[in-house]
Image (tube, helix red, strand yellow):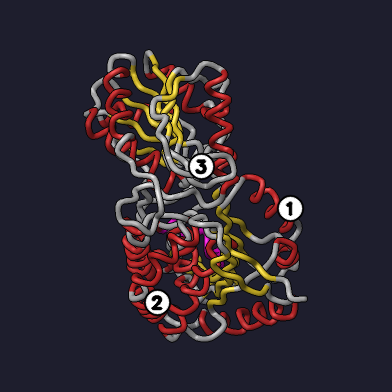
Amino acid sequence: MTETVKLKSPIDGSIYAERPVATDQAINAAVERARAAQEKWAETPVVERGKYMLAMLEALVAMTDEIVPEIAWQMGRPVRYGGEFGGVKERTNYMVEIAEAALKPVMASNPKDGFRRYVKKVPLGVVLVIAPWNYPYLTAVNTIVPALMAGSAVILKHAAQTLLVGERFQQAFDKAGLPKGLFQNLVMNHAQTEKLLGSGKIDHVNFTGSVGGGRAIEKAAAGTFMTLGLELGGKDPAYVLPDAQLDHAVANLVDGAFYNSGQCCCGIERVYVHEKVYDEFVEGFVAETKNYVVGNPLEQATTLGPMAQARFADLIREQKAEALRKGAKAHINMKVENDKPGSPYLAPEVLTNVDHQMSVMREESFGPIVGIMKVRNDEEAIALMNDSPYGLTASIWTRDTERAVAIGDRVETGTVFMNRCDYLDPALVWTGVKDTGKGAALSAIGYDNLTRPKSYHLRETI
């Protein structure tokens, strides 16, 4: 009997899609095709590669009307927000634009008569992208486009929750006329993925997902010496200073906490507010949160759809219950149809009277819940922001840029924001510290992580 992957929709629990798992023979053949195609692709000028990427982008954007409801059915994001193509366009266009400069050889800084010395950035070969369901297009494009621009071939294994996304990428690349074998979408189970990682046939893997998943990737790849890019989660903090423009901070932090039902690696999961503005901030934050409409993501009125799976929602329910037992105060308590254990539909929640003895302030939530703590000064805020096993982003809300930089210098994080959050700028490197993982995506540094340096030391005068 053929093994399949079933995609259960969070909207109504129905099986929205089902696909057969690739055979071991098909996986091996795909890798061989990728390797063969990559050799020719590496000789293709960077400008020509870029034309294929832009054609792919055009083909993908042309599918928007079909893709937007597909995303809702697959992982629950409301259709009112459209797709993810604003970010996909920005990242694709930028990485194509900078590719030629980012990939050019680096000349030795101390010229020597009679010698030509430089370092080339050569393709890694075959890159495996293991993409998550929460932002299924944005997270995948972070590696797919720059890896291809750098001259590698790409194999995509998308999350079971967003099976159709891999097919859409395949359709777009096929429409763009990308040479066969350079991009391939495969449906694989965990055992097959681990076997492929340990085979020595993959040169680089990029994985976005849980810390446990990242450890499994490292274990499977052990001894192959492939390079790794791992973005493994976050518990991203915000610090609101006394001089912050509160209405701006409230609006942006509420959105940063609850957009996409809080299912964002760099979403706001904990907020520290200076005691001078704490009461006013909490009042505004609670009022703004109460404006959310939870319901069917296919309806335009819905601003908060179901979580991708019921077990994710149950984790949030457990975190809330534990916090309340330990003395936290819940401010929203919104009545939502189907909000019960075993259901993916979940209302947003704001907690105060929280501390770091509660899991909601320490462990990744990845859902629509946020705790707000009062702090006395910068020292206390910095200590609390750093009291986490994660470090992806941190946001600081103040009118004083130098103070924000000074605080940011002391926060253990991959990105420091001031007066914004939950955003990825393709001109800046996307990276993390501690259990958030390792590696770097986007920007010119992202290209360094998707290439191998090769030195040329040429004596021209003998």
> Which residue does the image show at 35% across and 38% down from the upper left?
417
**Is label 2 in a helix, a strand or a loop?**
helix
Q: Of the residues tagged 1 and 3, which is closer to the observer?
A: 3
The answer to whether residue 446 is magenta is: yes
Quadrant location of the C terminus in the rendered image = bottom right
* Mark 2 lies on residue: 56
Instruction: Give the crowd class for mark 2: few <14, some 14-19, many >=20 residues within 10 Å.
Output: many
Residues drawn in magenta: 444-454
The answer to whether residue 124 is magenta is: no
Position in image of residue 340 (x %, y %) = 54, 39
Position in image of residue 13 (x %, y %) = 55, 57
- Camera sees residue 47: no
Label for residue 366?
Answer: 3
Give the spatial CA distance, label 2 vs label 3.
31 Å
Quadrant location of the N terminus in the rendered image = bottom right
238 or 338, which lies in front? Answer: 338
Q: Amino acid at mark 2?
A: Met
Earlier-in-chain disc, 2 versus 3: 2
Q: Are marks 2 and 1 in contact (CB under 8 Å)?
A: no
308 or 402, which lies in front? Answer: 308
Label for residue 219?
Answer: 1
299 or 25, which lies in front? Answer: 299
